[in-house]
Amino acid sequence: MDFDTFFAKTPATLDEIKNRVACALERHPKCRDVQFDIVSMPRSHKGGNWTISLQSIAPDALWEASDIVADIQEAYELTVAA
Protein backbone atom coordinates (compact mmCIF):
# COMPACT_ATOMS: atom_id res chain seq x y z
CA MET A 1 0.00 0.00 0.00
CA ASP A 2 1.27 3.46 -0.90
CA PHE A 3 1.04 5.39 2.38
CA ASP A 4 1.89 8.73 0.75
CA THR A 5 -1.23 8.43 -1.39
CA PHE A 6 -3.29 7.15 1.53
CA PHE A 7 -2.33 10.08 3.78
CA ALA A 8 -2.32 12.75 1.04
CA LYS A 9 -4.37 15.84 1.72
CA THR A 10 -7.32 16.62 -0.51
CA PRO A 11 -6.94 19.88 -2.44
CA ALA A 12 -9.71 22.40 -1.67
CA THR A 13 -10.33 26.07 -2.30
CA LEU A 14 -10.72 28.58 0.50
CA ASP A 15 -14.51 28.60 0.01
CA GLU A 16 -14.69 24.80 0.13
CA ILE A 17 -12.70 24.72 3.36
CA LYS A 18 -14.92 27.43 4.89
CA ASN A 19 -18.02 25.45 3.98
CA ARG A 20 -16.63 22.22 5.41
CA VAL A 21 -15.61 23.87 8.67
CA ALA A 22 -18.97 25.65 9.00
CA CYS A 23 -20.91 22.43 8.39
CA ALA A 24 -18.75 20.43 10.79
CA LEU A 25 -19.09 22.99 13.57
CA GLU A 26 -22.84 23.30 12.97
CA ARG A 27 -23.30 19.53 13.45
CA HIS A 28 -21.92 19.66 17.00
CA PRO A 29 -24.41 21.11 19.54
CA LYS A 30 -21.75 22.95 21.56
CA CYS A 31 -20.06 24.45 18.48
CA ARG A 32 -23.04 25.91 16.65
CA ASP A 33 -22.32 29.48 17.75
CA VAL A 34 -18.57 29.36 17.09
CA GLN A 35 -17.34 32.06 14.74
CA PHE A 36 -14.15 31.41 12.79
CA ASP A 37 -11.92 32.80 10.11
CA ILE A 38 -9.60 30.89 7.80
CA VAL A 39 -6.17 32.40 7.41
CA SER A 40 -3.85 31.54 4.54
CA MET A 41 -0.30 30.84 5.74
CA PRO A 42 3.04 30.31 3.99
CA ARG A 43 3.83 26.67 3.38
CA SER A 44 5.73 24.94 6.17
CA HIS A 45 7.88 21.83 6.14
CA LYS A 46 4.75 19.89 7.18
CA GLY A 47 2.86 21.21 4.18
CA GLY A 48 0.19 23.19 6.03
CA ASN A 49 -0.77 26.36 4.26
CA TRP A 50 -3.84 27.55 6.17
CA THR A 51 -5.12 27.76 9.70
CA ILE A 52 -8.37 28.56 11.44
CA SER A 53 -8.83 31.34 13.95
CA LEU A 54 -11.65 30.48 16.36
CA GLN A 55 -13.58 33.44 17.75
CA SER A 56 -16.58 33.84 20.04
CA ILE A 57 -16.25 30.35 21.41
CA ALA A 58 -17.84 29.17 24.65
CA PRO A 59 -15.43 27.56 27.14
CA ASP A 60 -17.30 24.24 27.04
CA ALA A 61 -16.98 24.11 23.23
CA LEU A 62 -13.24 24.77 23.02
CA TRP A 63 -12.01 21.17 22.96
CA GLU A 64 -14.68 19.95 20.57
CA ALA A 65 -14.12 22.82 18.13
CA SER A 66 -10.35 22.32 18.30
CA ASP A 67 -10.74 18.62 17.50
CA ILE A 68 -13.02 19.36 14.57
CA VAL A 69 -10.58 21.94 13.20
CA ALA A 70 -7.60 19.59 13.62
CA ASP A 71 -9.36 16.83 11.70
CA ILE A 72 -10.17 19.17 8.82
CA GLN A 73 -6.63 20.60 8.77
CA GLU A 74 -5.22 17.08 8.48
CA ALA A 75 -7.49 16.31 5.52
CA TYR A 76 -7.36 19.41 3.29
CA GLU A 77 -4.74 21.45 1.51
CA LEU A 78 -5.52 24.93 0.21
CA THR A 79 -5.38 25.29 -3.57
CA VAL A 80 -5.74 28.26 -5.84
CA ALA A 81 -9.24 28.57 -7.28
CA ALA A 82 -9.31 27.87 -11.00
Image: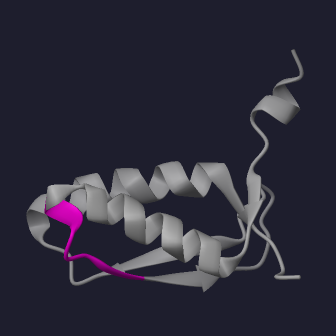
Q: Depth check: give the residue in front, 62 or 15.
A: 15
Which residue ends up furthest to the top in the rendered image?
1
What residue span does the magenta drawing correspond to?
30-36
Residue 46: give x, y in percent of width and height. 75, 54
Residue drawn at 77 percent across, 78 percent down: 42
- In the image, is residue 12 above or below residue 66? below
| Left or right relative to 41: residue 43 | right
Residue 58: give x, y in percent of width and height. 12, 72
- In the image, is residue 42 above or below residue 24? below
Residue drawn at 11 percent across, 67 percent down: 59
Q: Quadrant of residue 5?
A: top right
Residue drawn at 75 percent across, 35 percent down: 7
Q: Quadrant of residue 40?
A: bottom right
Residue drawn at 28 percent across, 57 percent down: 27
| Left or right relative to 65: residue 32 | left
- Quarter of the image where the N terminus is located: top right
- In the image, is residue 35 above or below residue 21? below
- Residue 31 part of the magenta-drawn span: yes
Q: Depth check: give the residue in front, 33 or 57.
A: 33
| Left or right relative to 45: residue 55 | left
